[in-house]
Amino acid sequence: MPVQINLKGSHVITSAKGVASICAPLQSIIGKNFLFRYGKIFDNGSRVLLTNMPEVFSFFFGEGVYLFTWYDDGLVLLRQNHLLGL
């Protein structure tokens, strides 16, 4: 049985509305929804994750999908330990 991680109340969920409002102007220009992901990995292995679609992260971690796929796939390394993906 996969280990499920409950993200309720976590920063990736509580900040999503603000991140979505920042993404809104670009989204209106593109004319399509897109998944914005930003992550920072600290030296101690902890992470900060930001997204405009928290339901993706809720599914990914809540259903244990993170155990057999890597959410960082396709992310661009901005600088050491900073990742960005659209």
Image (tube, helix red, strand yellow):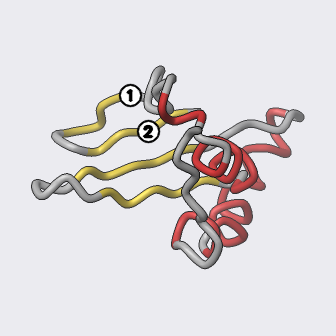
Quadrant of the image occupied by residue 13: bottom right
Residue occupying image coordinates x 45% and y 56%: 49
- Residue under circle 1? 76
Residue occupying image coordinates x 74% and y 36%: 34
Please tell me how crowded label 1 is: few (under 14), some (14-19), or many (20+) other residues with Cα within 10 Å: few
The relative height of residue 6 versus residue 8 in the rendered view (above or below) is: above
Residue occupying image coordinates x 66% and y 71%: 18
Give the Cα distance between marks 1 and 2.
Answer: 5 Å
Which residue is at the far front?
Answer: 1
Q: Quadrant of the N terminus?
A: top right
How many numbered marks does the figure carry?
2
Asked if the residue at tag 2 contacts the one at tag 1, i.e. Cβ–Cβ closer than 8 Å, the answer is: yes
Please state which amino acid type lies under the numbered disc 2. Leu
Please state which amino acid type lies under the numbered disc 1. Val
Q: Residue 46 at what x, y percent from top left? A: 26, 59
Q: Secondary structure at mark 1?
A: strand
- Residue under circle 2? 84
Q: Nearer the viewer, residue 80 or 5?
A: 5
Q: Nearer the viewer, residue 2 or 46?
A: 2
Which residue is at the far left?
Answer: 43
